[in-house]
Image (spheres, coloured by chain):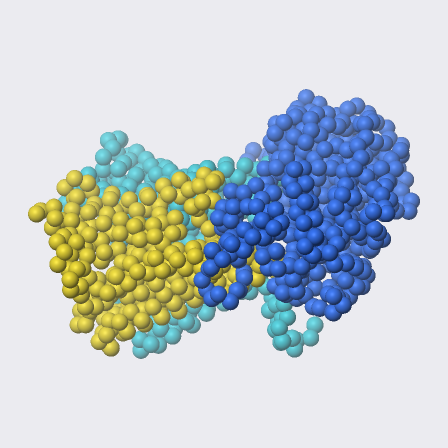
Amino acid sequence: MRGIVKRFPGVIANDEVDLVVRQGEIHCLLGENGAGKTTLMRILYGLYQPDEGEILLNGEAIRVASPKAALAHRIGMVHQHFHLVPTLSVEENVVLGLSEGTGPFLRLRRTREKLNRLAGEYGLQVDSQAKIWQLSVGQQQRVEILKALYREADILIMDEPTSVLTPQEVDALFGTLRTLVDDGLTIVFITHKLNEVMEVSDRVTVLRKGKVVATVETATSSKAELARLMVGREVVFRIEKATAERGEKILEVKDLHANNDRGLPALRGVTFDLYEGEILGVAGVSGNGQHELSEVLTGLRKATRGTAYLETNDLAKCSAREIADFGVAHVPTERIRAGTVPNMTIRENLILKSYRARPFCRWVFLDQNAATENACHAMREYEISAPHDGTAAKNLSGGNIQRLVLARELSGSPRFIVAAHPTYGLDVGATEQVRQVLLDQRAQGAGVLVISEDLDEILQLSDRILVLFGGEVMGIMQTAEAELEEIGLMMAGSHRREVAV
Amino acid sequence: MTRANWIRIERRPTLSPWVVLGVSVAAIAAALIAAGIFFKAYGVSPWRAYHLIITGALGSKVGIAETARRTIPLLLIGVGLTVAFRALFWNIGAEGQLLVGAIAATGVALFVPMPEFLRLPVMFVAGFVGGAMWGLVPAVLKVKFGINDVISTLMLNYVAGFIVQWLILGPWKGPTARGFAYTDKFPASAMIPRIPGTTVHWPTLILGVLAAVIAYVWVARTRQGFEIRVVGENPHAAQYAGISQTKVVLAVMLVSGGLAGLAGVGEVAGVQRMLLDPAKLSLGYGYTAIIVAWLARRNPLAVIVTSALFGVIMAGGDVIKVSLGLPFQLVNVFNGLILFFLIGSEMFMRYRVSFAWRKR
Amino acid sequence: MEWQTWLVSTVSFMLVHGTPLLLATLGEIYAERSGVLNLGIEGMMIMGAYAGFVTAYLTRSPWIGLGVAAAVGCGFSLIHAFASITLRANQVVSGLALTLLGLGLSGVLGRPWGGMPLPNSMPKIMVPVLADIPILGPMLFDGHTLVEYIAILLVPLMWFILFRTKIGISIRSVGEDPATADSLGVNVKRVRYLCVAVGGILAGIAGGYLAVSYRPAWTEGMTGGMGWIVIALTIFAFWNPVIGLAGAYLFAALYHLSFRLQPWVSPELLQALPYVFAIVVLVFVSRGSLQRRMGAPAALTIPYTRGED
């Protein structure tokens, strides 16, 4: 792939990316979230079209207009979230969308034979008549691989394949990959985990913020070097912030366990403390438990084990409403989908959590005047720019929506704030503003938990940094002492540190 | 934004009430025109037909009475439906809730001994409770088992209908005349007073208007109304804000079912003064009310207008049946057309269509 | 011999009365399997009945009548398809509107035809050798029309298509997980249109059958709410054509028996049973794994958009 450029509104996902993959190798794409790895591969698979640049297959320029075209060029992809229909069987899923020349009828026996042969060759045994929902995640992934192999893919793209597997399944997968490569297939492997890269790849391309940083031979590199490449940056402009005046401990999280939506463990024994007047930044690549952590702490998800004491209340056992009543603020990741009601006005969105009590509610009636006054005040203080408080939230820009959310959440002088990806998708001005707001809250004595994929942001804002990987705490350290390389290693799962307070 | 050769379709950022009104009116107009084609096919001038409808339904005292009589149940049910729809609960079961309300009222009217002056009020309460219970069943089914609200409410309609039929042919059988079954006539204390000379049971009408106003205030101004709106607009945000979707759904169906039950009381004690065949009791009010609520864009106050509109249509249908010999089914055609054009017009509310040759 | 006569007449009636139920249910199964809820069946059936009757009357051929009924049902269903698939309108409302339209139109157009018997109704046949089998003979092979046999034959055919062919896989995947199907190259819209059309065709034929064979005359509203029973039946059948066969005949038998059993059980309560059954089935299927196995198609009533429009 040469000179690939892909732009999305507000961000350049791929910026003049060159990628050269040799036949018969396992090539890893390494980078943090937002580095552009998945976008690049989606272009290769025909799900996106590049704005500029070209794709050359065996020296010939090709156009991949759709996944069907990609498959025609023998490029297959195993997605992070499987494209499988749960109620159909394995063989039915494999055959879905295929237009073989056998007419409308299924030659299931033939399919089964071919499947079994492929499975045997590559060690991907699975019961071809089982329904997908009956299979374990590892088995489902095998089906995805088999799907690509059945369509005679020469190049197999795998997007973060180990994120859903157990360690044993990961080993099995790597074995499979080596067998496939021995047979002449080429594999492109997207990941953010360093040991995987070291274990299984021949060469690695490191992406950062949409650009290629380097392409190296794995054998001649090291984890440390890769970590540096992945995460390294020049000294970043740091916001002037007052030194931390840390107060009392307000949050004590002990051995927190929780499952994700698929029922797999997402948090495995998370333990940390949070103090008044500090910002604890949770670093890590998305998908390592951050989302679930924010949900458990705000009552949107039940923990399976462990406690999270906010003073005397165990948040892990409380409902969202109770937690909001305790004075916990939640700035959610999906600010439009979950954090606001798009069709309602600014005024109404601002009282989304506080409408039950005075001054917004007298007996059963909502006090419109109080709400309006509140809205005007909030709009002024947080510089929400809109025609008037009766504007619908969906008409606001991303930055203004976030200001709205902040105004609402922070209005009650909360003691504990959970801010998940607070500046995601915002322009520079809004970003600075949001960060400043969080710092102000810290100055006022709140304990802030900031979850972000943007390491810059974490470094700028946090007093301490916690790195999450695979649902576990890799390390907690003072920001001042933090070394980027170490953080990079932790984020990639290759380093663990004794917890420092 | 999609762009074909000469036409541009883009999402509409804001939805001004004028656009809504304009589109709704356009939809009705389109239906009128389409129905006009039918009239033409029958050799009747559309103008004459519409003229007859308007004058027939509104031009005389009898006409207005007939219109009012049909408006009452549409109003009550329509208000209930707007509330249910606001919480995204598709209550197709208003017909059944009406019937159950009627059953409850009949039971109290004929079989429960009590001081006579209490009878009518108790009937109203019983009707409300009956309808509410019938509405709570699908609500519970949805909340507890995740069962589709459309299907469960629909099925219960028929169950209710059969229960009515069983009652009038079995345990509650009264004197049968000419092969039609019905219960005994209600005692005088169980009859809702009417405007003399008509079948307009005015207390129920007042109830209906009251219901519309209260419902409007409830949804727009109270705490619970706020919760209802949030659940309907964005269930995720509702969860995030700690709003209990269960409580909202149950509350909403209690009200929606209850109001339909009141309509049932009105029909059985105000119009018919006895329980009879379900098809005669409810002239499809439960289904027509869906259109009423839809057209009112889920605004309870607007239901006052839209229910009157459909009252006119239904009464007008009777008029042209009598004077022009056109079948009453035309009303169904008309209603179906309106509904269709309404749905079709929603696309125009979501998107703005412009033509390329208009330079910005 | 009493009970034998009773058995013969019951089963015979089952076949006759169950056939329109079966036909329409088969169609609705396909539509719902692809994710589209079609509440307009009643409208399509009655329009099919009307069109079938008029055509059969005018052409003196019940078969042409059936053909036209199928076409009319198809056309009607395409309106619903357009509204719910292309315009992504609310499927419930669209279906209801269609039913209203169908009931109304047929009532209006059918006025002049009311009460006129059809001279050339569908001929009842007697299968030569098989009709002589004691009991089974008169029950199954004497006095039925070809349509009833065709309906039965359709069942294994439609089952086969749905579960053993590629197009069946496409249909089922579109109804369960349209996003995945789309990403694998299946044309979601086209599949849904097709299935809704099939539903319309079969509903039209079911209605037409009512008018040219079951009760060869036209009466306003002659479908008598059958369309709604079909919706219940589809659920009761767990969206499976074979169970649909059993269900259709069961419901028909229930209807017939409701009159026979009158001295003991009220017929109305028996007639309400199908609807109660449907709800019971839904509750039964609502548990996690059962839902996967036998439940409603996951994407039912949800219009599909590719990404954000």
- Left or right: A102 as drawn, with respect to C232: right
Where is residue A26 drawn, in percent x and y? 74, 52
Determine the residue positioned at 35% across, 47% down.
Answer: C236
* Residue C294 visible in the shown view: yes
- Left or right: A59 as drawn, with respect to A338: right
Determine the residue positioned at 19% across, 40% down.
Answer: C265
Where is residue A98 drawn, in percent x and y? 54, 61
Where A402 falls versus B223 (above or below)?
below
Q: Colour of chain B?
A: cyan
Where is residue A491 drawn, in percent x and y? 78, 39
* Residue A393 visible in the shown view: no
State the residue lying farthest toward the left.
C1
Pick the front one: A13 or B187: A13
Residue C16 found in image quarter: bottom left
Determine the residue positioned at 63% across, 65% down.
Answer: A72
Determine the residue positioned at 40% across, 43% down.
Answer: C282
Residue B20 found in image quarter: bottom right
Pick the front one: C297 or A462: C297
Q: Colour of chain C?
A: yellow
Where A190 falls versus B189 (above or below)?
below
Pick the front one: A95 or C159: A95
Residue C195 found in image quarter: bottom left
- Left or right: A36 as drawn, with respect to C60: right
Quadrant where the image shows the C terminus of chain C: bottom right
Q: Colour of chain A?
A: blue
Picture mark count: 0
Where is residue B351 drawn, in percent x and y? 59, 64
State the residue lying farthest toward the top.
A312
